[in-house]
Amino acid sequence: MSDEPISLSAALASFDTLWSPRIVTRVNDYDVRVAKVQGEHLWHTHDHTDEFFLVLDGELQITLRDRTVVLRKGEVFTVPRGIEHKPVSPGGAQILMFEPTGTPTVGDRHEEIPDHVDATTGHQLGG
């Protein structure tokens, strides 16, 4: 990881792939990831960790089985571990996530992975 400041704008400008997060830094055993999203992700559950979302630009909806949480620029939401959810962004968004290193983007349990979703534990910037 870099010992210099990291520009989130530059990090986001370095890739175009949707639903394919990039690791910008690590804090202890956690990845700080940025992603560009548009359309629908998939229903999934993280059994052992919460999932933190911060919207940097645009709007992100976190669909839960009983409601939909709408996040706009500058807003955060944490999905508690074990809660099934589906991120959706009809108009597109840029987001930051904070998750334990090695956490798969599709959770521990999920529906069939569509072609537009990158099932990964995050990519290094430039990768």
Image (cartoon, grey):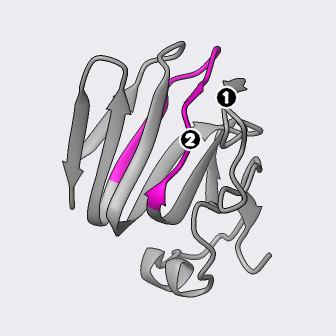
- Contact, mark 1 vs mark 2 (Cβ under 8 Å): yes
In reply to whether residue 30 is colored magenta, the answer given is: no
Q: In this view, does 44 lie to the left or right of 96?
A: right
Q: Where is residue 52 in the image (x, y as percent from the top left)?
A: 43, 37
> Looking at numbered disc 2 in the image, what kind of residue is underneath it?
Leu
Q: Which disc number belongs to residue 42?
A: 2
Q: What stretch is highlighted in magenta?
A: 39-54
| Mark 2 surroundings within 10 Å by alpha-carbon count, few (fewer than 14), some (14 through 19), many (20 or more) | many
The disc, 1 or 2, on the residue closer to the chain's N-terminal end is 2
Q: Quadrant of the C terminus?
A: bottom right
Q: Quadrant of residue 118?
A: bottom right
Q: Residue at x 58, y 38 (%)?
A: 99
> Looking at numbered disc 1 in the image, what kind of residue is underneath it?
His
Q: Which disc number belongs to residue 83?
A: none
Q: Quadrant of residue 82?
A: top right
Q: Where is residue 86 in the image (x, y as percent from the top left)?
A: 46, 37
Q: How many labels does the image show?
A: 2
Look at the numbered disc 2 and give the secondary structure of its residue: loop
In the rendered view, would you say 81 is above or below 44? above
Look at the numbered disc 1 and give the secondary structure of its residue: strand
**Which residue is disc 1 drawn over?**
110
Q: Is residue 5 left or right of residue 95?
A: right
Q: Which residue is drawn at 51% across and 43% down?
A: 98
Q: Nearer the viewer, residue 85 or 55?
A: 85
Q: Which residue is drawn at 67% across and 38% down?
A: 106
Q: Nearer the viewer, residue 76 or 41?
A: 41
| Mark 1 surroundings within 10 Å by alpha-carbon count, few (fewer than 14), some (14 through 19), many (20 or more) | some
